[in-house]
Image (cartoon, rainbow, N blue to C red):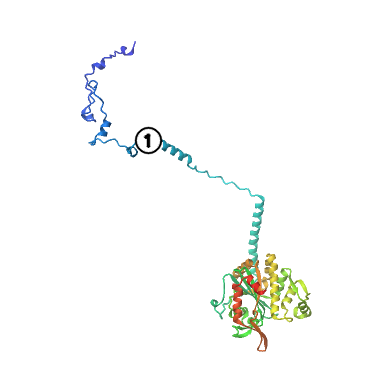
Amino acid sequence: MPRFDNEGFNPDSRINNDSRDRSVPEMENYYGKSNDFRFNDPVSDSPVIDNQQKWVDINSYGDIEPPVRNQRQQQSGYTPEVLRDFDREQRQQNLYDRRNQPTPKKPKKRRRKKINKPKKILYSILAIILIIILLLSLVVNGILGKIKYDDPIENKYVASSELKHSPFVKNILLLGVDARPNQESETSRADSMMLISIDMKHKCVKMTSFLRDSWVYIPSHEGEQRLNAASAYGGYNGVVDTIEYNFGVDVDGYIVADFEMFKVLVDSIGGVEIDVTEAEAREVTRNKIRYGNVKLEAGKHKLTGEQALAYCRIRKIDTDFVRTKRQRTVIQSILNKAKKNPLRLFSMASNSAGYLETNLTKGQLKRAAAAGTYCITGDMLQEKIPFEHTWEYANKSGMSVIAINIEKNKEKLIDYIYNKTAEEIKAEQE
């Protein structure tokens, strides 16, 4: 039997309760009095009013606002299909953007590169070179400690602004003195004077010999005299002052060596090869007392330090011009030998440092050595003072001297040291 019958359910109870008031209370009638849903009235057959169409047709809405459309919906020709197409395009664009967005790269783990055998050899060679450079720097400091240093003295006879100078040129005056026993070196006359110009601009080394019999004005003597007498009047600085005063070039400093150092220098590199003439060999061999019992043979031979010194001192058979040329020939032979094996430079410097005297500081010597290393692979040129056609022999105070044109030699020397290239100088000398 159905459950409702057991519980006394009466299906007609709803009909019997139709007398109840189902109208909307006034306080809860949110649609206004004219919108009574009339729940108690029977179902009306009146047609349904389309209020949406009413909103469209009414120009004045009163208190009721019409539905708001977005900008796209307000455009003319709007249809629901347009909105669907727009949504589809937007979804496709978003999908395209996501697919083409670059993914962040994960940091790669650094892997240790394998060095092949050739590279290992190269790195080993570079390491060895670095070690050699560090060791040589210590050796250089040791070499510099053996040199005797003089206090630099400023030239009081000519202003530095009046001298020709260049940051690309280093001028160092080499003085060879023939100091006798028990004689102060600075009181002896300079037997040889050679200006070494390290030209970094034209990458070459220019050597200029000054003939010792040249008649010049010596400021410390306050008069004219032979050039080699300048050291006797004003010491080594007196030679520098005299060259600067007469020829207008800035001399950075001097390096002095006696004949004993010259022999040690040549022997430290195993001798030098020199082409000796018959007259030169005969002069040295026959005059044992003058040249220290040294023998020379004509021809191209490797000379020892004693033989090379005797060769440089020859002057009885010819002029002082030829004598200074022999000195430059030996110096150039030494430099050429060092050029083939630069490590010999340290052997030369180590063996001869104890015989040297200079007014340059250790820093100046290091910079000059660095500049010389840069230029030593270039040309090595020779010249002399006085230049050709700028001098004549003369007799001064009963002495045979070389009278020179100071202004012409000054002009030519400045042009030679600072302006001319190696090719121009060699073309002129040929």
Identify whether 54 is placed above or below 338.
Answer: above
- Measured as percent of width and height from the top left, residue 430 is found at 67, 74
The amino acid at mark 1 is: Val
- Measured as percent of width and height from the top left, residue 174 is found at 65, 75
Q: Nearer the viewer, residue 417 or 313?
A: 417
In the figure, residue 74 lies in which quadrant? top left
The answer to whether residue 44 is left or right of residue 280 is: left
The answer to whether residue 60 is left or right of residue 113 is: left
| Residue at the extreme top of the image, as rendered | 1
Q: Nearer the viewer, residue 35 or 129?
A: 35
| Residue at the extreme bottom of the image, as rendered | 398
Identify whether 205 is placed above or below 387.
Answer: above
- Measured as percent of width and height from the top left, residue 242 is found at 60, 80
Q: Residue at x 39, y 34 (%)?
A: 84
Tell me the residue that label 1 is attached to. 82
- Measured as percent of width and height from the top left, residue 80 is found at 36, 33
Q: Residue at x 26, y 30 (%)?
A: 51
Residue 359 in view here: no
- Secondary structure at badge 1 equals helix
In the figure, residue 19 lies in which quadrant? top left
Q: Nearer the viewer, residue 309 or 249?
A: 249
Residue 26 in view here: yes
- Name the image quarter holding the N terminus: top left
In the figure, residue 93 lies in which quadrant? top left
Q: Nearer the viewer, residue 330 or 363?
A: 330
Q: Residues within 10 Å of mark 1 (few under 14, many from 20)?
A: few
Identify whether 191 is placed above or below 350.
Answer: below
The count of marks equals 1
Q: Residue at x 26, y 14 (%)?
A: 12
